[in-house]
Each structure stands twice: as C-alpha cells, then as structure tokens.
Image: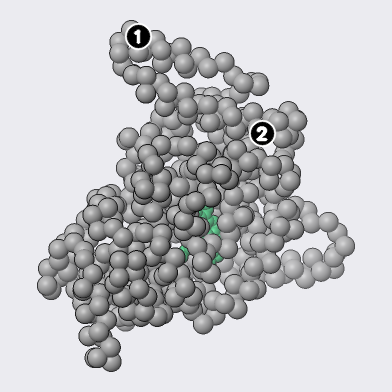
Amino acid sequence: CLKEYLRYRRLITSLHGPKSNPFLGNLSDLNCDDATLFTQLRQWAQEYYPAYKISAGLYLCVNIVSPEDFEVHTECVLSESVTSVSNRSTMDSAVQSSKWQTRRKILTPAFHFSILQQFVTIFNNETEHLVEVFRKNCHKPYINVVPYISQFTLSTINETSMGTRLNMDDEEDKTYYSTTHQIGKIFLYRLLRPWFYNNVFFYNLTPVGRKEKKLVNILHHFTSKVIKNKAKNFEEFEVNENEEINYSKRKKLAMLDLLLNAKISDGLIDDKGIEDEVNTFMFEELILQEINQVLNESNSQPSYNELQELKYMERCIKESLRIYPSVPFTARVLEEDILTSNGYTLPKSTIVNIHIFDIHRNPKIWPDPEKFDPDRFLPENCQNRHPFSFVPFSAGPRNCIGQKFAILELKAALCGIIRNFLLEPVDTPENIVLVTDMVLRAENDTVRVKFTPRN
Ligand code: HEM
C-alpha cells in the first residue's frame, strides 16, 4: 500500500499547479466564499492549462481543462464517482459503482423517444403554470426568474419520474424543495474537505454532518412516500392497461429608438452596445418567428415533432449551455492510470475534476468566447471541433442520461414563455456574479428579467 501511495503522490506532485503550503496544501486558497472560489478556479484553469494539481493537506486532486484530456479520462471512470466516495451516506445505493451499469441499463429505455413523446404533455402543462405565474407578476419592474425556474424543473422531474406534482402551498413539498437546495451546499462543503471523505464517523459528529443527516432523512422520507403511493397507483394502472396515458408577429422594436436616442442625446451607449442589445432582441424574435412558422401561427401546445423542428431555438439553447453550463464542474475517481496530453501520468485513484465551464470558454476552440452566437452550432461549424469541446451533459459512458429530456423540456418552456412575453434583461453578464455550487448559480440566486406580455 505504502509503495502504491508513494508512487501516486510522486506522479501527481510532478504536475504543475498553484503554490501550496507543505502541510495545508491549497486550503487557504480554497477556504473562501463561493464567488471568490469560482473566480479562483477559473484563473487557475487559464494559468495551468491543460491540467493542474491542487491539494488539501494529504489529499491531492487533478483538475482537467482540455477536451483532449477530458476524452482520455472518460475511458477510466466508468464506476466510482466522487459523489459516492465523498458522500456515501447521502447517495449510497443510488450511485454506488458496482450497481451503476445495471441501473443505467434499466433506466435507458425510460428516455426512449416513445416515452419522451408522452412527457411533452407534462412539459406543456408545467409551462402553462409557469407562464401563469409570470403573468401574475409581469406588472412588476422585473421578476427574479431563478425560484420559478427551479420550481418548474423540480416539478417537471417529479411528475415525469414519480408521477406527482409539487405543490408549493403544501408545507411538506416546500420543505422538500428547500432541502434539495441545502443539500447541494453541504455536498460542496464536504467535497472541499477531503478529510471527511472516508471519515464518516467523525463527520457525522460535526454540526454539518448532523445537519446533512437531518436533510437526507427529509429527502428519503419524501421519496419513499412518493414511491409507496406510486406503487399503489401502479396496481390500479395495470387494471386499465388499454387506456391511453393521461397525462403579433414581429413586434416593432421601439427599444431601438430608445437606444439610438440614448446614444445621440447623452452618449450613454456606443454602437457596439446598441448592437449587443439589438442582438439580444433579435435572437428572441427569430425564435418567435420559428415557433410561429412551425406551429402555423396556432396557439396550440407544441407536439413532440414540432419541438424537434425548432432547430434555431435548439442552437440558442446549446449556445446558452455553452456559456452557462448548468453543471460547471464534474468530479470522478480514475480507475486506471492515464497519460495526459502534455505527457504526465495520472495514477489510478486520482480524483479528477473537469472544468466544463472553462472548456466551453477556451478561445482557441470558441473565438470571442463570451459572445452569444447560436451559429456556432450550425452543422458546418461543428465539423472540425473536438467532440469533447462542448460537454454540458458531460461525455463518454457516464454522460447525462436525461439530455434529450432536458432539451425537449427547455424547448417546451421557451415556446410558452416567448410566445407570451417579450423579455428584457435587467441583470446582464457584466453584473451577474457566479458562485461555486453543484450547479451553476448566480450570487443570491438572482437573475432579474423584465416581462412584457405580448398582444
Ligand atoms: C440542462 C439540463 C441538464 C444538464 C446540463 C445535465 C448535465 C449532466 C452532467 C454534466 C452529468 C454528468 C455528471 C457527472 O459526471 O458527475 C449528468 C448526469 C446525469 N443526469 Fe443530467 N443534466 C441535465 C438534465 C437532466 C435531466 C432532465 C435528467 C433526468 C430526467 C438528468 C439525469 C441525469 C442522470 C441520471 C445522470 C447520471 C448518469 C450516470 O451516471 O449514468 N439530467 N447530467
């Protein structure tokens, strides 16, 4: 064991990375607020491309920033995920490595297009609820969309996977919703403190460990209740097995007048600024044009096939997921040694973090990376790109099983929102502060948008 450990340490420590203290490693850099940590990781990603090491005391991990190394690593991370190492008490049976392959096989048919077709009705109904909430609030100067969007996604996944609607007036459902948020924070806390990984006994005695236990019990209680109810319904369902499953044209851009006025009268905005603002509108108008074309101007809910036809919208979704990938980092444990593109050997058992966020903003692959340009995803523009340079759903065997589901759900939601409202950003990339979490979040969970109802 000692020989293996020393080899492991020697190989990882030969990799470059930020300066570290011999005893504490990079703990002092990592022990900061979530926003600073996010910026810090991005800075290291640029400085130490394509891969670098960081350490926390005796624990070491390697961060990968290049598509090439990401591709190599995916061949060696089939089973064990960091979630299962660091968080066994939370996610134990669901993610444990030995069971992964069997479970993935069982679950894959649940995402077959014939099943997704049935989910479209749920997506559309949930979208109607969302549009209704926005309509009630659209008289306000802006709406913070984050809580509404996360309730929408949680409600949709609940209904499609477990067959129940979340009801935010119900205390238990409300607690479940807030618990899913809090557990993410605790997971991150533990991920950054590797001495808690294997030390479950000690961790459970800490205040955070005790809180985690309480939250996990709430989640387990909720899901087991839903599963029990579902099991009852399932018997009823079998009896009825033959039953079907129940489940202004272009607006005048008055904004442009305002922008031009602001430029001429007080020089508050320059030509580039106006172009950016108009582009923001144009994307939305082009999406609306496509929706009207595909749905023949009707007000009906879109069908599965119609959603598939919304190609321009799909490019806009992909470009959004490139600039703001919902999962900015993933973490896994290597099962075998790998050789990185710059000639380093990363030994078996290394914890590897993938900077999805930075892969998506690599200027060599994505010129002018901060610019929103859906045409990057035209087939002819994708041809020569490395297949692992766009990875919002990760890649390789452990990629996201729900990616088609997610795109379809996003399309249904956008269809409902854009047909009903004209959107204007209140928060912009310049003032939004991103923070480290399990999923990409803006500081204080706030992204403000102005909603104006369309006639
Ligand atoms: C925009 C939406 C989504 C994004 C960006 C996304 C992204 C990802 C990523 C990056 C992973 C890999 C995580 C890792 O390697 O640690 C993943 C895994 C996974 N995702 Fe998603 N996801 C999305 C929506 C969904 C939805 C809607 C579902 C279910 C309906 C889903 C189910 C899963 C599952 C089950 C896994 C684990 C797969 C496995 O380990 O075999 N995802 N997702």
In the displayed structure, 52 sits above or below 298; it is: below
> In the rendered structure, which disc, 2 or 1, sits on the residue that comes first in sequence?
1
Tell me if the residue at label 2 has its CB under 8 Å from ligand 1. Answer: no
User: In screen coordinates, is 235 left or right of 261?
Assistant: right
Residue under label 1: 264
Observer-nearest of 314 and 420: 314
Residue 53 seen by the camera = yes
- Distance from Cα at disc 2 to Cα at disc 1: 35 Å
Residue drawn 41% across and 12% down? 260
Residue drawn 55% across and 34% down? 134
Residue 34, position in %: x, y?
A: 28, 53
Residue 53, position in %: x, y?
A: 25, 67
- The disc labelled 1 sits on which kind of residue? Ile
Q: Quadrant of residue 426?
A: top left
The quadrant the N terminus occupies is bottom left
- The disc labelled 2 sits on which kind of residue? Ile
Residue drawn 57% across and 67% down? 223
Dot 2 surroundings within 10 Å: few (below 14), some, or many (20 or more)?
many
Colour approach in the figure: one colour
User: In screen coordinates, is 389 left or right of 191?
Assistant: right
Residue 437, position in %: x, y?
A: 36, 56
Residue 149 seen by the camera = no
In the displayed structure, 234 sits above or below 185; it is: below
Residue under label 2: 291
Q: Are marks 2 and 1 in contact (CB under 8 Å)?
A: no
Dot 1 surroundings within 10 Å: few (below 14), some, or many (20 or more)?
few
Q: Quadrant of residue 190?
A: bottom left
Residue reaching furthest to the left: 22
